[in-house]
Image (tube, coloured by chain):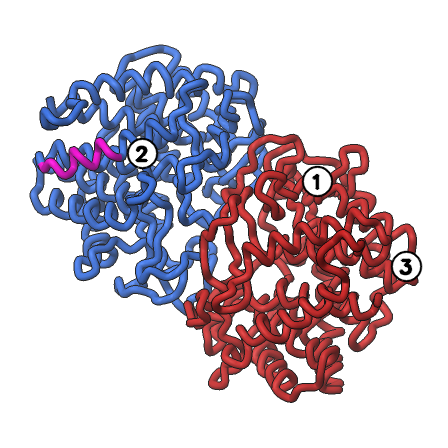
Chain colours: A red, B blue
Amino acid sequence: MEANHTKDLNYYKDFYKSQLLNDTVPFWFPRSVDEEHGGYLLMRDADGSLLDDDKAVWIQGRAAWLLATLYNTVEQRPEWLEGAKKGIDFLRQHCFDTDGRMFFHVTRDGKPIRKRRYFFSETFAVIAFAAYAKASGDEEIARDARELFGKCLEYATTPGLLPAKYTDTRPSKGIGVPMILMNTAQQLRETIGDERCDEWISKWIAEIERDFVKDDIRCVMEQVAPDGSIIDHIDGRTLNPGHAIEGAWFILHEARYRNNDPHLIDLGCRMLDYMWEWGWDKEHGGILYFRDVYGKPVQEYWHDMKFWWPQNETIIATLLAYLMTGNQKYADWHQQIHDYAYSHFHDKENGEWFGYLHRDGSLSNGSKGNLFKGPFHLPRQEWYCWQALEAFR
Amino acid sequence: MEANHTKDLNYYKDFYKSQLLNDTVPFWFPRSVDEEHGGYLLMRDADGSLLDDDKAVWIQGRAAWLLATLYNTVEQRPEWLEGAKKGIDFLRQHCFDTDGRMFFHVTRDGKPIRKRRYFFSETFAVIAFAAYAKASGDEEIARDARELFGKCLEYATTPGLLPAKYTDTRPSKGIGVPMILMNTAQQLRETIGDERCDEWISKWIAEIERDFVKDDIRCVMEQVAPDGSIIDHIDGRTLNPGHAIEGAWFILHEARYRNNDPHLIDLGCRMLDYMWEWGWDKEHGGILYFRDVYGKPVQEYWHDMKFWWPQNETIIATLLAYLMTGNQKYADWHQQIHDYAYSHFHDKENGEWFGYLHRDGSLSNGSKGNLFKGPFHLPRQEWYCWQALEAFR
């Protein structure tokens, strides 16, 4: 970044590395590894004390992914490999129902509490299994990862295979499915390899570009009708800027993988440009949770709160866009979101980030982990940005 | 209330009557009656413009209940009876699935969008049918009301009859079921009469007192284990003060019906006392949404927001407690919550109340109606308080 910025790329590289290894990861590990039952105890208060010993299956997979990824890419620390194995074993032993689908929420000892109608427990297990298979060289886990990815493809492409939340009256589809599947495939490909991935990723990107990205209104929709048209009802109008920006960097990541494919760089940057405009809070800073595409009231109660993860995804997207295009606008945005996020979300006393702030930046909820938050978006951001800055220097 | 209060009971009686008839009801009617498809168009922005033409089945029933109740208790205005019929017909023609259960959300022309695993669409249809049957003298609707109430009893007492959201690993029950069924039975009894009601109401009150009211920690739980023990996990610890206070006034209402039964007065007042302490925001005023029984962070993101309906329920409960006990504390609380609510929630420009404020009283969302808000808690509060003040004068 330019000389008139106080922070240069080296600063950020060192900062992200140091935060990851000296602040974020030590908040969670080793204390969260459940030596008695396996898996992780991740529902923690601001100071790290345990709020609940239940286990959220998404987060169990994400934590195992993190530990295996650190082992694969940072340093071969035995505690990271052993910690990852604890999660992998717990997922395999306790988190699958007899029909092959996964639960969403289980007790400390692995008894099922809730199963949902989505397959995101499965996608996060795929990336955990794949990263651990690479770390351990365990061929059986690699096979499991590929097989489970196959099931995800089946769930995503077979109407009626999973129970439906809504009737067929007004069919819709969310950007979450192609986005998460794309990232799952990227992880699978870049750890243990899988021949199916490139073609599927191309299809999902094409679907996102065709059906969700609306150049005429400079917007990325969160939900659309199957033909890509906007559904003019409350849910259909609701935008999720942080989520779309996460999708933008998955596409920029794909552009890197494909030798800086100019079309994909353009697509990812357009998505980021549009959704920065929708999401960035010009009054208080930070990325807002929801907006309505026609400026009407949003029904979700936390629409104007600041959650941790949209900030993480925007830090990655703006940095990556700058590194790939050299466009100073993205360096400026990166500095803005970085400064906002680390000054408001970072818990300087206990480490890690708070998850939930009011719009004005005041704290709503001090917990570090619950059913939906754990060691994922923040450490992934710090890891990804550090690695990207290493690669681009 | 005492002379040192600026507002006496006559002031409140006139105020609630006037707000109901000159502000709240005219916001919704006649414009919300859907002359083309039947039912009501209730998803409205602050200024009354339509946000969405979908129909939330709970709210369709509640709106029909309101119109029929105004006809029964305020004045026999033909437009109220005709308006109620529009909702009753829509509910009967479009809101039942082939298995006899009701939908949750339908399109303007009555096509189903979503069905949920609860039977609250049914309970609100019961009170609508019962109130309309009294208003119209229509025996067929009265039969439908009683039959549907019978189904609710069956759903509530037959494990496994409705699809489950959670597994059997950690069974729990919510206070919502006995509370809402109690109020449904009260409405049924006091409109068209039903011999089953008194006994059931006694059972539900006994269950609430035995399993949900915790005198040792001065608290009313929102969820407990089947034996009434506290489930020490995030969900099990979450308190909903406004909801428990609604339950408190349902019990005070029952005490009135039972010739001021002293045990029920004591129970209702205890519930109100406990949950006022948990819910009242000593810093900003108003009733908070959620608290954790052990003071830990609450997972629900809107825990510290101010929603309209907990204020409405608390206005009723404090007024009724004062009228029934003469305890000045309740008059003071009523004045506090009344002043807070009408100065922060009431939309002086367009009428009716906003639904969603931040903790500090600033506006989060200006909509007057959506899937969850419509003409119910506010008009019911104004109607109930007015009627109670008439009865007690």
> In this orientation, which residue lies closer to the viewer: B6 or B94?
B6
Residue A260's label in the rendered image is: 3
Q: Quadrant of residue B358?
A: top left
Please indicate, yes or no, whether residue A32 appears anywhere in the rendered image: yes
Q: Is residue A8 left or right of residue A57?
A: right
Let me know if residue A103 appears in the view. Answer: no
Q: Residue placed at 77% from the left, 60% from the top?
A: A182
In the picture, the quarter occupied by the N terminus of chain B is top left
Q: Position of residue A120 (x, y in %)?
A: 64, 62
**Residues rendered magenta in the picture:** B327-336
Q: Quadrant of the C terminus of chain B?
A: top left
Please tell me which residue lies in front, B148 or A326.
A326
Circle 3: is it few (<14), some (14-19), or many (20+) Cα within 10 Å? some
Q: Which mark is residue A277?
A: 1
Q: Residue at x 55, y 61 (%)?
A: A346
Closer mark to the observer between disc 2 and disc 1? 1
Q: Could you tell me which chain the residue with mark 2 belongs to?
A: B
- Kind of residue at disc 1: Glu
